[in-house]
Amino acid sequence: FSAVPVAYSRVFSAMGDGVVVVNRKNRVLDLNPVAEEIAGFTSMDAIGHDLGAVIPELVPVTEASFSKKDQCRIEIRRTTGPRYFDVLITPMSEGLVTDGAYLCLLRDITDRKQAELALSEANKKISLLTNITRHDITNKIVAVHSYLELIRELATDPVQIDYLGKQEQGL
């Protein structure tokens, strides 16, 4: 059936995630256009080369995942800034490729990671503001309490003393 190779080629090229196929020796066997953009190499330049020369951040992940399915998160630093990827490593059937290849799927999560970092930074600022505000309020309460003590020492009218007691209970 001749549609299968065409469908494979179109699906592989149209995927929104980067796909790199690597053998056990970490040689690049294939990569799709998204992976080309991530790596900064065309497939013509990358195929046959060591993965460390193409996407060095993937090497530790692939070496730890030779014969098992694995998942992790990596950061790739480029001149345009860091990019973050969820990586899924899937071994391919030995019958398909003679030297036991595996597929590396790279999903770009840079926007989500940047949002997480921004949220974390905002939470730190809110926490700092909360601590400062709590400290300021505590200082003012201590000052009011001290003034109430001074007034209590000077007060002689029982009605005033009763009001001072109520004010102290309110603090």
Image (spheres, rainbow, N blue to C red):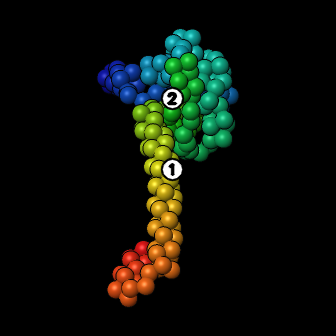
Query: What percent of the width, then of the height, locates residue 168?
Result: 43, 78
Q: Secondary structure at mark 2?
A: strand
Above or below — where is 85 with respect to 30?
Answer: below
- Kindly identify which numbered label has been placed on residue 80: none
Name the residue located 62 percent from the left edge and 37 percent from the top edge: 61
Provide residue 167's location: percent of width, then percent of height. 38, 77
The residue positioned farthest toward the bottom in the image shown: 158
Q: Nearer the viewer, mark 1 or mark 2?
A: 1
Residue at left offset 51%, top offset 67%: 142
Camera sees residue 134: no
Amino acid type of disc 2?
Arg
Total marks shown come to 2
Note whether residue 154 is visible: yes
Query: Which amino acid type is shown beneath numbered disc 1?
Result: Leu
Q: Indicate the secondary structure of the residue bearing disc 1.
A: helix
Give the residue at mark 2: 83
Mark closer to the chain start, 1 or 2: 2
Q: On the picture, is 51 further left or further right than 11?
A: right
- Is residue 58 positioned above or below 125 on the image? above
Q: Provide residue 28's location: percent of width, then percent of height.
A: 59, 22
- Mark 1, other Cα within 10 Å: few <14 / some 14–19 / many ≥20: few
Q: Position of residue 33 (x, y in %)?
A: 44, 19
Q: Residues within 10 Å of mark 2 (few under 14, many from 20)?
A: some
> Label 1: which residue?
128
Q: Disc 1 to disc 2, how far (Cα)?
A: 29 Å
Q: Residue 115's quadrant in the figure?
A: top left
